[in-house]
Amino acid sequence: MKYTNNTIRINVIFIVGVVLLFGLFFVKLGYVALEDEVEGTNIAKLAESRSVATRTLTAKRGNILDSDGHYLAQNMNSYNVIAILSESRTTDERYPKHVVDKEKTAEKLSEVLLPLNKTMTKEYILKLLNKEKLYQTKLGPGGNGITEQTKKTIEELALPGIEFEKSLKRYYPSGDFASYIIGYAKTDEEGNTKGELGIEAFCDRYLKGKDGTITYQRDAYGYQMANSKYTYTTPAEDGFDVYLTIDQHVQMFLNNAVKKLVDFDPSWVTLTVADAKTGAIIGSSSSPSFDSNKLNLVDYNNPLTSYAFEPGSTMKIFSFMTAMELNKYNGEKLYKSGTIKVGNYTIHDWNKVGWGDISYDVGFTYSSNVAAILLSEQITKKNMIQFYSDLGFGAQTGIELSGELKGDINIDHISEVASASYGQGITTTPIQMIQALSVLTNDGTVLKPYVIEKIVDPNKNEVVYQGKRTEVKKVYSTSTVKKITELMDLTVNGDDAKATGKVYHTDAVRLIGKTGTANYSENGKYVTGSYNNIRSFAGVFPRDEPEYIIYIAIKDFKGSSKDIGSVIQGLVESVAKYKNLDERVSDLDPSKIVEVPNVLNKSVDTSVSSLQAKGVTSVVIGDGNVVVEQYPKKGMNISQKTKVFLVTNGNKVTMPNMSGWSSHEVVDFCKLVGVKYNLEGDGYGYVESTDIATGTVIDANTIVSVNLKRIEPESLVEGGL
């Protein structure tokens, strides 16, 4: 082929043009490579931003524990059930990765999830699976936050297209247990957990921790590149652990007591035990209550702090003490009981007719309104308000719980002064009553109640807050405390059959106290009816060396005073036995009290022998040969009848012979092993039978049910306590 001059010229021009274009391209490329910015854009930063990602490192929420370190609230792995709906997920038809048979899938999942949530019917799940144009869908609400065991059950169904999304869930191992004190926390869709009631809410700023971040270089698929120099991490700081003053055994006794009272269909019950020398709340139970895992609440108000009501005759403790402190009291002086005129009102004693001419001391044990009113006339309004205020009534105690009410002690007219002397016309809360009762056990000084023992930073293993005894004010003298203690003793333990507290007497320990019955109003009017009142009891035990304060209030109780007294007797006896205060047990003399030795990391044989030498029975948990945990802990003083549990390094745990065990020993064992339990029968008794045979292997899925019977220690079967 011949090329003309024009053709050659065109080819040359084309080649030169191409060369020039490439030259310009490389010049531009060099410019971009050498310069930080091009046309106002930082190229290096742009490239880095497109290859660098940042994600949040979620802090672990702190735990809530009781005074012995048992978990009351903790984090656990949970899972959300996901259904893959898009066929594009399946690349090999032999191994489908999406939901193929929706009918079957809905039916099988419903069998597992419906018992957990009544919403999860076959029809409801099928509706979720039939959603169009979705790649995947969550099977909520029943498929959200399921446990490891439920996940395993669903996996065994081998349903194509069913997958799981891992998350953390707040878990309350004891369920309905001091629920209003512990409270609960909720996790939102973004995974943020926030406390909404009780300690979970009050201590949220301590529990929640501080999230961290990780910044890393990613590849084209978005995954973190290994050994990348662009990885920067700000560590997450886990939340603090909160230890409560709650004693799990005392709390269990309280729960059992409330259950017995609920049989009489009251509107509500609140029952609390506090440490008499420190003000620490060691147990508080109520009805209605709730399971913090299920959030089956009917009332968001904590009865301990958020119920304010007219306290009734338990206030006579303080009106009588005030008269004594002001030298206006002569216990032997006689007065006419029955009725008294106050302004335009005629006020009666509770039995309407009184008991004739009786002394003021007797008037206290009979719970005479007339006696209290006559004393109030000597006290005067100013002094009554001052002393009631000094005791903490009409103000928040400051306990570490949200929603605390102040109550109302506004007193103006002479009739209000009179009614306030016997606990009507004013309102108080149970926690205020606990606080005021502390004057009986601390030589007239008010102690502030508290429920947090300590807060620990697990990141540094440091105690950042320590709860302690806090004196509020000295209100009464030693002589006043001594005198009212004598009257409260006569009320419960005296020989006079007409004393109002006789039904609370127990031979186990010297309990002293005062009863109360108050009317309550609705819509501005007092409610009338045989059972329409609020009954209460305020007590202290033992009398001579007080260890505990107890207060109960119960509304619309459909039983008798004897029924309430019987339940409180059982409660006090259980606490007395547990704390080695039972005066009836002959072998609790000093020679029978031993100090628990330290057997941690020692062989099982050596540990058992060491305890036997002290006359103490041990219960070995697991098939290991070394002790890794013990309870009670080293250094504790216990009765020789108290069992010491030894947890070994073995994994195989078998059911022991629980015959004759006390209820709190059953709880100790189950909590150490990590199994659930049901206590049936008398909550203050001893094990009569169990539903699991001795020697049976048990694990986390086991539920131990025991039947308790109230029997005296001497009649227990051999091998018991």
Image: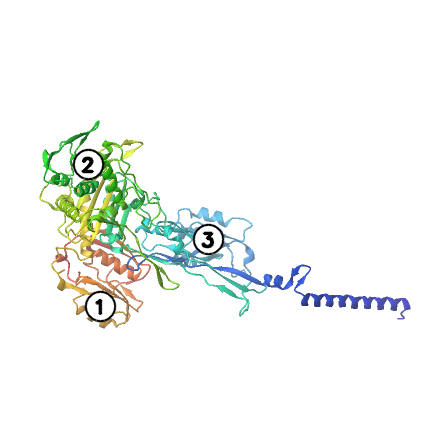
Q: CA distance from mark 2 to mark 1?
A: 56 Å
Nearest the eye: 321 or 547 = 321
Q: Name the residue at 30% across, 33% down.
A: 522
- Image vertical order of residue 359 relative to residue 672, above or below: above
Instruction: Report x, y in % for residue 663.
Output: 22, 55
Q: Is residue 705 visible?
A: no
Q: CA distance from mark 3 to mark 2?
A: 75 Å
Q: Earlier in the sequence, mark 2 or mark 1?
A: 2
Q: Amino acid at mark 2?
A: Ser
Q: Amino acid at mark 1?
A: Pro
Q: Earlier in the sequence, mark 3 or mark 2?
A: 3
Q: Which residue is mark 3?
A: 105
Q: Which residue is mark 1?
A: 597
Nearest the eye: 6 or 354 = 354
Front disc: 3 or 1: 1
Label 1's element? loop
Q: Name the residue at 21% across, 28% down.
A: 343
Q: Earlier in the sequence, mark 3 or mark 1?
A: 3
Label 3's element? helix
Nearest the eye: 530 or 540 = 540
User: Pointer 2: residues within 10 angstroms few (<14), some, or many (20+)?
Assistant: many
Give the number of the disc on residue 22.
none
Quadrant placement of the N terminus? bottom right
Q: Which residue is mark 2?
A: 376
Q: Is residue 85 visible?
A: yes
